[in-house]
Image: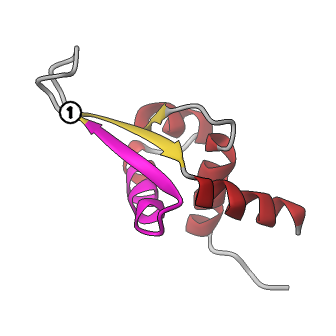
């Protein structure tokens, strides 16, 4: 059996959470995964490079908190990948 790195497990968990079609913030994902914000952010940006998620930045001028906010949602490609992983 192939051993999967812990960081890869986190990426798969992120895809699984996002597979419900909802939009999540990095903060909310970090709470659900019980890991830190930075870990979630790095993994989401990597998943975005693979076009498995879309990271949407809300500029500080448009944000109620006056800070930039990130929203993450899964892409069709990401849904296909997580379905394949769950099926195997």
Front residue of 41/88: it is: 88
Residue 40 higher or lower than 63, as above or below: below
Image coordinates for residue 50, horizontal then vertical, percent: 47, 69
Q: Residue at x 22, y 14 (%)?
A: 64
Image coordinates for residue 27, horizontal then vertical, percent: 43, 33
Image quadrant containing the C terminus: bottom right
Front residue of 54/17: it is: 54
Residue 87 higher or lower than 15, as above or below: below
Quarter holding residue 46: bottom left
- Residue to which mark 1 is pinned: 68
In the image, which residues are magenta? 41-57
Characterize the local packing of mark 1: few (<14), some (14-19) or many (20 or more) Cα atoms within 10 angstroms. few
Q: Residue at x 21, y 17 (%)?
A: 65
Image coordinates for residue 81, horizontal then vertical, percent: 69, 64
Image quadrant containing the N terminus: bottom right
Q: Is residue 34 magenta?
A: no
Horizontal relation, residue 58 to residue 86: left or right: left
Front residue of 33/75: it is: 75
Q: Is residue 54 magenta?
A: yes
Front residue of 46/83: it is: 83
Can you name the residue that lies furthest to the bottom here? 1
Horizontal relation, residue 76 to residue 50: left or right: right
Q: Residue at x 47, y 63 (%)?
A: 51
Helix or strand or loop: what does disc 1 sit on? loop
Q: Residue at x 38, y 58 (%)?
A: 45
């Amino acid at each position: 059996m192939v051993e999967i790195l812990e960081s890869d497990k986190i990426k798969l968990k992120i895809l699984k959470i996002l597979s419900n079609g909802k939009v999540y913030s990095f903060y909310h994902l970090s709470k659900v995964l019980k890991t830190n914000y930075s870990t979630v952010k790095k993994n989401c940006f990597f998943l975005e490079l693979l076009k498995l998620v879309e990271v949407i930045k809300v500029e500080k001028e448009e944000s109620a908190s006056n800070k930039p906010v990130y929203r993450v949602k899964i892409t069709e490609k990401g849904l296909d990948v997580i379905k394949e992983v769950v099926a195997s």
